[in-house]
Image (cartoon, rainbow, N blue to C red):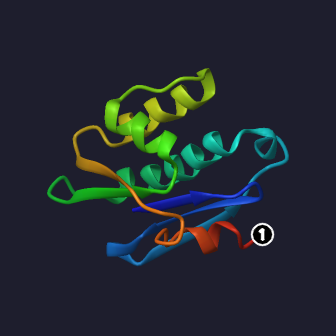
Amino acid sequence: MEADASMKGGAYILEERKITKAFKWSEEQTEQSINVLEALALLEGTRDWAKKGSKEEKLMIKTDSQLLYFALKNRKATGIRFNSICREIVRNLGGYEWEVEWVSSEEQLADAPSRYFL
């Protein structure tokens, strides 16, 4: 799964299932930091994954957000809102095998769909 955010919208791609979803942020969400928006985009993807995921499938999460990468890898985040979203992401993935990988913005497949609303 790849997830990304811009200040206007977010997107995630479940490549193995050929699912791409892009969404526009609400006015309230646009007031959040880019780190919170990156986490919210991934949260949306993990909600979808948790509904349809198989316990036999390993989920590889790719993010171009270093803060989100380290928060998930170390299971430790700062900031009340960011921490709360990261905890929900981990809860959604409970019982599934998963790992997180940092990728550059240029390699991030969800980058273009997240900017669709610009």
* Rendered position, 113 above or below 83: below
Residue 5 percent across, percent down from the top left = 63, 57
Amino acid type, mark 1 = Phe
Give the secondary structure at mark 1. Answer: loop
Quick one: label 1, few (<14), some, or many (20+) residues within 10 Å?
some
Residue sitting at the far right: 27
Residue 92 percent across, percent down from the top left = 38, 41
State the residue at coordinates (42%, 44%).
69
State the residue at coordinates (64%, 46%).
37
Residue 36 percent across, percent down from the top left = 63, 39
- Determine which quarter of the picture holds residue 28: top right
Query: In the rendered view, does 73 fall on the left or right side of 10?
Result: left
Query: In the rendered view, does 38 fall on the left or right side of 15?
Result: right
Along the line of sight, the residue nearer the viewer: 28 or 33: 33
* Rendered position, 10 above or below 99: below
For disc 1, the marked residue is 117
Residue 39 percent across, percent down from the top left = 55, 44
* Rendered position, 93 above or below 104: above
Along the line of sight, the residue nearer the viewer: 58 or 112: 112
* Rendered position, 6 above or below 97: below
